[in-house]
């Protein structure tokens, strides 16, 4: 198993080449992550981004969050992010979340935790510890957004393009992820990023209790609901008469 120091050294070098390329060429993978964030992260949320890289997704989120803390194992990446995202809503720190999590205790809990294309690059032996930290720092009604290389694409890379693999590149399956966390799935989808089914987008959240109470509905919602009920009844009246005559 690679040590934290070895992984950090690799990503410091990785940042100097690969991350800079993302400022020259539109990264479809990152665009898909931004869409996922827009869908699930509420305006004004407090966000922790684990694996912020050079801050491209962070800058997209800056306009909708009240606070963002971006962490990355690479000090080089963090320096880039600080230069790229200069607003006072965002803070960036070099941190190995599986080893230095005590440094997160200074922050309040987060409404959303984003893990963008990072989980597959953490050794499986450390992933349980990662999820323990995530659960510790997540609000009870918070959400965790995880994106990772699909197992099919990962196996293709391993078989056909091993030169594209990083220092740690695990094959992840949903069942394995759910086995190491108490968080429950809210959303799961395969996503194209230039090629079909390259990535998986996953949303997890704490388990919810059932409530018999109806969710609050405003006046406009009540009008729409009543209109839909009326239209449905009118649309099916002829069929109901036929059933009563021929079946009942």
Image: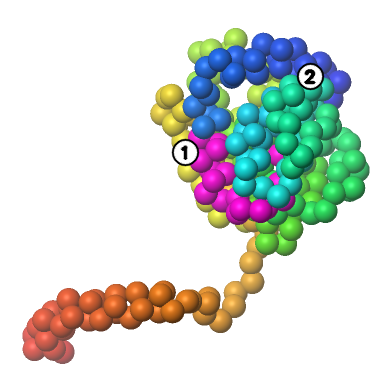
In the rendered image, residue 146, in percent from the top left (x then y), is placed at 62, 41
Place of residue 248 in the rendered image (x, y in percent of width and height, measured from the top left): 15, 89
Q: Residue at x 71, y 46 (%)?
A: 47
In the visual, does 157 lie left or right of 13? left
46 drawn magenta: yes
Identify the residue under disc 2: 76
Residue 11 quadrant: top right
Instruction: Determine the secondary structure under disc 2.
Output: helix
Direction from residue 238 to residue 224 in the image, left or right: right
Query: Quarter of the image containing the N terminus?
Result: top right
Write down the residue under mark 1.
190
Residue 246 rendering spot, x and y as whole percentages: 8, 85
Residues shaded magenta: 32-50
Classify residue 132 as left or right of residue 217: right
- Image spot of residue 75 (x, y percent): 82, 22
* Mark toward the start of the polypeptide (2 vs 1): 2
The circle on residue 172 is: none
Q: Is residue 34 magenta?
A: yes
């Amino acid at each position: 198993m690679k040590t934290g120091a070895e992984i950090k050294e690799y990503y410091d070098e990785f940042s100097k080449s690969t991350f800079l390329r993302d400022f020259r060429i539109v990264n479809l993978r990152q665009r898909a992550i931004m869409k996922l964030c827009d869908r699930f992260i509420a305006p004004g949320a407090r966000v922790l981004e684990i694996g912020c890289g050079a801050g491209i997704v962070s800058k997209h989120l800056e306009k909708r969050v009240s606070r963002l803390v971006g962490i990355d194992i690479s000090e080089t990446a963090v320096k880039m992010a600080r230069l790229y995202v200069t607003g006072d809503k965002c803070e960036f720190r070099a941190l190995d979340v599986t080893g230095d999590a005590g440094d997160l205790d200074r922050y309040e809990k987060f409404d959303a935790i984003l893990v963008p294309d990072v989980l597959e690059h953490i050794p499986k032996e450390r992933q349980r510890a990662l999820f323990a930290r995530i659960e510790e720092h997540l609000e009870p009604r918070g959400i965790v957004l995880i994106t990772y290389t699909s197992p099919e694409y990962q196996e293709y890379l391993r078989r056909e393009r091993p030169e594209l693999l990083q220092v740690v590149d695990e094959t992840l399956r949903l069942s394995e992820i759910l086995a190491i966390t108490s968080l429950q799935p809210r959303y799961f989808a395969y996503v194209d990023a230039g090629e079909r089914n390259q990535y998986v987008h996953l949303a997890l959240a704490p388990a919810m209790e059932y409530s018999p109470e109806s969710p609050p509905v405003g006046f406009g919602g009540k009008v729409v609901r009543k209109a839909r009920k009326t239209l449905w009844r009118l649309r099916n009246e002829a069929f109901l008469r036929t059933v009563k005559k021929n079946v009942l």
